[in-house]
Amino acid sequence: MRHLRPGRLGFGTALCVALAAAGTLAMAPAATAVTPGTATLSFDCGWYGSGSATLTATETGTTGTISLATKAISSPIPIGANSVTSTLTLTKNGSGTTQFKGSANPAIPAGGEVSTGPLTGTVAPGDSLAATSLTVVVLGITATCKATTPQSPGPFVF
């Protein structure tokens, strides 16, 4: 029977754990770059307001995410976290549309700008998406916003 010297089992175990972790990371879907990563546009939300919006996009595999902060809608009262439901409609590859949806938002103070996201949608490599409208539901009240300027810089390419 072989006797192990102190420390040998620890090194071998650590090496196996490191190799297993590296293999797991190699198989996990990587976040890929969306270009541009950030864009702006303006929305008109009717009597709810109008103003600029900043969109930030990321991608992991076939899931795209877009977070949105807009001066177009402000809250007259404090809004709790994760209580705003949003749907962002985007043109897809120059024709047709796709939607990104979500119900995540930070807490919004009275008078604060509405921020929402991440909104998620399905994407394919090379998809070119540009925002055209936003529907926001806060406390049962629906605000529909139409883009009044093109997304700049250009569409998101996933």
Image (cartoon, rainbow, N blue to C red):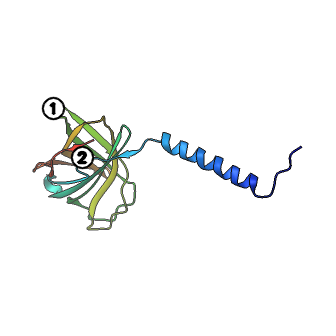
Instruction: Report the residue marked by disc 2.
Output: 135
- Asked whether residue 139 is in view, the answer is no
The type of residue carrying mark 2 is: Thr
First of labels 2, 1 by sequence position: 1
Instruction: Report the residue marked by disc 1.
Output: 95
Residue sitting farthest toward the top: 96
Q: Within 10 Å of the Cα at label 1, are there few (<14), some (14-19), or many (20+) other Cα atoms?
A: few
Where is the N terminus found, in terms of image quarters?
A: top right
Residue 90 location (% of width, % of height): 21, 41
Answer above or below: position of 95 versus 129. above
Residue 99 location (% of width, % of height): 27, 39
Residue 156 location (% of width, % of height): 22, 45
Q: Nearer the viewer, residue 28 or 92?
A: 28
Please state if 67 lies on the left or on the right of 93 as rendered.
Answer: right
Name the residue located 51 percent from the left edge and 45 percent from the top edge. 25
Name the residue located 37 percent from the left edge and 54 percent from the top edge. 83
